[in-house]
Image (cartoon, grey):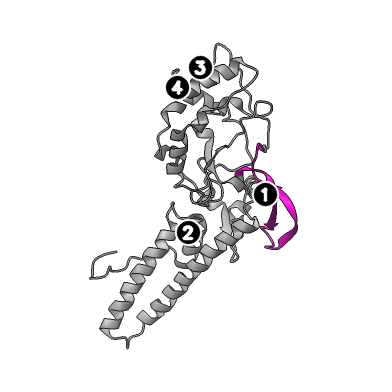
Amino acid sequence: MRYFDRKRVDRPSCLDMDKKTSAAHKELQKNIQNKKKVFNAYGNDAVKAALEKLFHGKCAYCESHYSATQPIDVEHYRPKNAGTGYFWLAAVWENLLPSCIDCNRERYQLMFDPLTGVLVKKEKKAGKHDHFPLSGPKAAVVFDKAFIINNINLAATVNAEKSLLLNPTIDQVNVLFTYTDEAIIAPSKTAMTSQVDMARVDKTIELLGLNRVGLVAKRKEILLSLNVLLYTVDKLTLLLRDSTLIVASRELVKDLLYYLFKEIQRTCEPNFPYSLMCKTVVEKRLGKLPSVATPGGGGA
């Protein structure tokens, strides 16, 4: 999970609650009046395109690229079901996230324990489904004549609610997770300093199944490749310190380091799968990536 600023992408016009003619506004008006709720506006192709742009074609929860193997699930952070959910947020832009099937749909999974790294032998249910754990009372709203339906008012209905599930467009999740050498996600040292943060991190990992076997295996592949790059940088840096190295060889080593650093930087970019893990590992090993001369003597 990595933080993404929702303001980076414009709200799709079909979800603009400030306009009474928008599909979302019309749908909500009907759902307020009718006992049977209908939810269609959020499934508009423009919504899917906006979410894919915002999260670079990745699952908002686990950072897996889903586009090559499965369609996007438009996930409701707060569930839309009419009985116990938040039907009035079904087509609110701030409540929508892109999700892979495994993070969004509940089923049994084999998991690694985030604290011990041990594979738990018994399968556990994971996947958000329509769960939304809270540490306080659930938000409620009364749609009387005084309530004006618009983007700001609808988003404000849940401002006081205390969710246990982290939201990658609201919470500063980048500092709350760390990763083991086996690519298992766990609470960071920062998270451990706060009981509230710890509770939210633990619940998020558990509910979404962020240590399910298949996901950890995918992260491990990326981590192994990244560690090869970092190991090579270490060795080339040692070689560069060799005072007996001839000038031509020294320039060749610098060129190699330049391309290695470029590739390492690429793994930390927002569009790269599991980029928060990569960024965490790189900064732990190298700190801020140093600037090196480009091939031909230019600046990096």
Residue 135 versus residue 90: which sits nearer the camera?
Answer: 90
Q: Name the residue under label 1.
A: 206
Q: What is the crowding at mark 1: few (fewer than 14 residues within 10 Å), some, or many (at least 20)?
A: many
Is 109 within the magenta?
A: yes
Residue at the outermost top position: 145
Q: Mark 2 points at which residue?
A: 279
Q: Mark 3 points at which residue?
A: 148
Tag 4–tag 3 contact (CB < 8 Å): no
Q: What is the crowding at mark 3: few (fewer than 14 residues within 10 Å), some, or many (at least 20)?
A: few
Question: Of callouts 1 and 3, which one flags the residue occurring earlier in the amino acid sequence?
Answer: 3
Q: Nearer the viewer, mark 1 or mark 2?
A: 1
Q: Which residue is drawn at 62% across and 28% down?
A: 86
Q: Nearer the viewer, mark 2 or mark 4?
A: 4
- Which percent across, then down, holds residue 191? 60, 52
Q: What is the crowding at mark 4: few (fewer than 14 residues within 10 Å), some, or many (at least 20)?
A: some
Dot 1 amino acid type: Glu
Residue 252 versus residue 44: which sits nearer the camera?
Answer: 44
Q: How far apart are the alpha carbons under marks 4 and 3?
A: 15 Å
Question: Of callouts 1 and 2, which one flags the residue occurring earlier in the amino acid sequence?
Answer: 1
Q: How many labels does the image show?
A: 4
Above or below: residue 28 compared with residue 131: above
Q: Name the residue under label 4.
A: 22
The reply, left or right, for residue 267 in relation to residue 59 is left
